[in-house]
Image (spheres, rainbow, N blue to C red):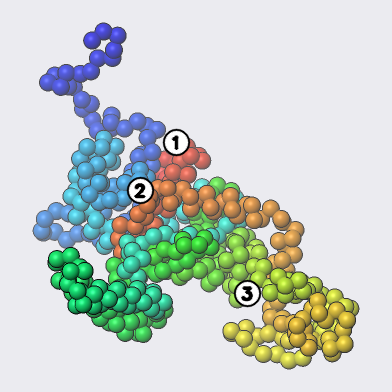
Amino acid sequence: MKRFVDSVDRSQGLLLPDRLEDYVHEENPVRVVDAFVEALDLSALGFEAVDRAAGGRPAYHPAALLKIYIYGYLNRIQSSRRLEREAQRNLELIWLTGRLAPDFKTIADFRKDNGSSIVSVCSRFVALCRRMKVFSHAVVAIDGSKLKAVNSRERNFTAGKIRARRELLDESVARYLAELDRADRDPALLPEGRVPHLKDKLAKVREQMEALDAIEQQLKDTPDHQISLTDPDARSMTSSGRGTGTVGYNLQAAVDAEHHLIIAHEVTNAGNDRAQLSAMAIKAKDALGAEHITALADRGYFNAPEILACEQAGIIPLVPKPLTSNSKAEGRFDKRDFIYDPRADAYQCPAGEAATHRFTTEENGLTLHKYWSSACPACPMRAKCTTGRYRRISRWEHEHVLETMQLRLNARPQVAVTRKQTVEHVFGTLKAWLGTTPFLTTTLPKVRTEISLAVLAYNMKRMIKIIGMPGMLRAIAA
């Protein structure tokens, strides 16, 4: 064949490189994986079989299996069966493992049996980044994202879902019985064989009803009144979009605002973010080793006790308050129109009257002070203020913390854009890597292991992009 690049004859003998070292270029990222794992003290991290006793069949060293998994998540290969095939044919993996080719069961069992140790490996890489002084700005963006579990929506049950499914089954029973009644009146109205089919359908519906009754009894014993049959730890979660609910987990991440590295992460099965702020911010602060950090979050994290906990831990939270005032929505004054005077411990209302302190109460675990003005009944502006006789104002005992945070937000209007550009980029990348089926395992501990591997791969790829291959190898060797 003229004027084409010639292929090699398959029957011709080849002189392949004599050394595995020649298979991988010096700038190949797989060298960072090798150097990082070799620098770890796997025994201190708790990996099984590092100091294996003599006797029995020889095992694969945890370092080799850990390298396989990190390489897999770096290259979007999470399946143990796919990793088994890659270890037999992929030159990078052949170099990385020294031509070891464990079977898929060995690979899968390693991830299952060493979950907490793999999570610690992810933390060690963040510590390496801190040692390299990458985190020069102690500013983190915190957010959560819902990821689908190995559990369909049909195999997740709540009281509302059981009620809706029972109504559908009742409708089916009524429809089947109506057809049978027609067959009793005139057998010619139904095709031959339809009656046995309907009776079979009725039997199956009754079985489903009995199964729903059993599940309903189990729901009464669960703390959150929810059951998932495939993955018992997965929970039904809703989001702001209509019809976008999913059965899965809530991935929390604290991301460095400068380099978009994931400093801290956690996987929960809580359906919202309201109770996650302080735990994630403190975890990020510990990972950075800083005395003070600034934590950016969206309105879903606004929770007064959580914000107070951040302040007490040396963290500056910047969380906008949700706009949920019914008064403002209906065209009346809201709380922001009342000015608090700390010296008089009173509010000045829009009409210029003083709303004084009346009593203190406790609601939902918060100590609240109640204020109102005696001038309310005769006030000409009362219709714009309240539908009742008095306009009552509640003030939390630590309200000054929320007011100080709002002043900081007013002085930094770009905070919302910074948070969005920082953490949502990370979630978009992780979801693209993990694909439409993010998890291959069930239960919360195993899911945390999978996420830790994905986070480690993300951070490793980011660091190679930021400082390059030579810089990474020198830092690991230091």
Left or right of residue 143: residue 384: right
Separation of marks 3 and 2 at Cα, in angstroms: 38 Å
Left or right of residue 355: residue 395: left
Helix, strand or loop at disc 1?
helix
- Residue 124 versus residue 98 in the image, above or below: below
> Which residue position holds label 2?
73
Helix, strand or loop at disc 2?
helix
Quadrant showing the C terminus: top left
Separation of marks 2 and 1 at Cα, in angstroms: 22 Å
Please name which of the two marks, 3 or 1, marks the residue nearer to the observer: 3
Nearest to N terminus: mark 3 or mark 1:
3
Q: Amino acid at mark 3?
A: Ala
Rendered image: mark on residue 304: 3
One can see residue 150 in this view = yes
Q: Farthest top residue? A: 2
- Residue 222 versus residue 425 in the image, above or below: below
Neighbour tally class for label 1: few under 14, some 14-19, many 20 plus, Cα within 10 Å: few
For residue 237, which quarter of the picture? bottom left
Q: Residue at x 23, y 18 (%)?
A: 7
Rendered image: mark on residue 470: 1
Q: Amino acid at mark 1?
A: Pro
Across and down, in percent, residue 333 comes to 78, 74
Q: Amino acid at mark 2?
A: Tyr
Helix, strand or loop at disc 3?
helix
One can see residue 67 in this view = no
Neighbour tally class for label 3: few under 14, some 14-19, many 20 plus, Cα within 10 Å: some
For residue 95, which quarter of the picture? top left
Across and down, in percent, residue 463 comes to 47, 44
Q: Residue at x 32, y 69 (%)?
A: 155
